[in-house]
Image (cartoon, helix red, strand yellow):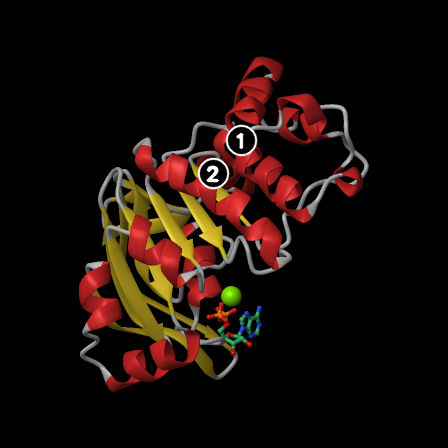
Amino acid sequence: MIEVLGVHKSFGSHEVLRGVSLEVEAGEVVVVLGPSGSGKSTLLRTINHLEKVDRGFVSIDGDLVGYRRRGEQLYELKEREILKQRRHIGFVFQNFNLFPHLTVLENIAEVAPLSEARRFLERVGLADKEDAYPRQLSGGQQQRVAIARALATRPKVVLFDEPTSALDPELVGEVLDVMRDLARSGTTMVVVTHEIGFAREVADRIVFLDQGVIVEEGAPGEVLDNPVHERTRAFLSKVL
Ligand code: ADP
Ligand code: MG
């Protein structure tokens, strides 16, 4: 469903992604672990074409992201076409990114019909909050609204960038519960998180990114309990 092949990305002289390749099957849940600054957010953002890659490519369900191929040549899509393509890719940010001046229902109705908006609000357990404004909700509730909005376009994949990092500890569980439910229902997900318990329980595969390279990947039991790479061990010893 997702294919990332040989992706390089630099900001100025700093090469943040140094040849990342990652395949994610339909229905698979991949958790990306790695130290701060290792390129996790940049990797997610290239999958969504929020960042253009310097080299390599990304495709979702066989479609190149951000480009059209004509013969041997690649042409970048127009902004309108990129926006259309992004509807196939749900993105959940650390800081929710809800519109503060819109109600919960309006936030979701920005991207989907009302009936769909209500359906997904119900799915995240917030049907009774549709007329509330984001500031009237807890952080956990706001993030659940953001997840409902990400789902409402019926994306092929959903990307999560540290979805619980901005939350008070007692609110983390309700968001992880929603994500666990999505994973169980077969949603294709790539999740950047430091929630190791969630990774162990929900991930089909864990990928460890360090300094812009995937240094290790495998089943949660392998990567978490028997990390091969010294850098993975060092990282896990800090977060476990
Ligand atoms: P992570 O999410 O793993 O913490 P990021 O992908 O956010 O890492 O960032 C990786 C590196 O790239 C960091 O050193 C960061 O400062 C740098 N970086 C990210 N985005 C930009 C940008 N738009 N301009 C310049 N540097 C950036
Ligand atoms: Mg990040």
Residue 183 appears in the picture as rendered: yes
Check residue 178 in the rendering and tell me which mark sits there, or answer none.
2
Q: Residue at x 32, y 48 (%)?
A: 202
**Are discs 2 and 1 less than 8 Å apart at CB?**
yes
Instruction: Note whether ligand 2 is within 8 Å of mark 1.
Output: no
Q: Nearer the viewer, residue 116 or 198?
A: 198
Q: Residue at x 24, y 56 (%)?
A: 205
Specify the quadrant that holds the N terminus. Answer: top left
Q: Which residue is mark 1?
A: 124
Q: Nearer the viewer, residue 77 or 104?
A: 104
Q: Residue 168: x, y in percent?
A: 64, 57
Task: Examine the image and state in which quarter residue 98 appears.
Answer: top right
Instruction: Report the Cα–Cα distance between label 2 and label 1.
Output: 6 Å
Q: Residue 129: x, y in percent?
A: 70, 26
Task: Examine the image and state in which quarter residue 109 appears.
Answer: top right
Q: Is residue 30 left or right of residue 146?
A: left
Q: Is residue 84 left or right of residue 74?
A: right
Task: Examine the image and state in which quarter residue 227 appears.
Answer: bottom left
- Determine whether 113 is above or below 59 in the image: above
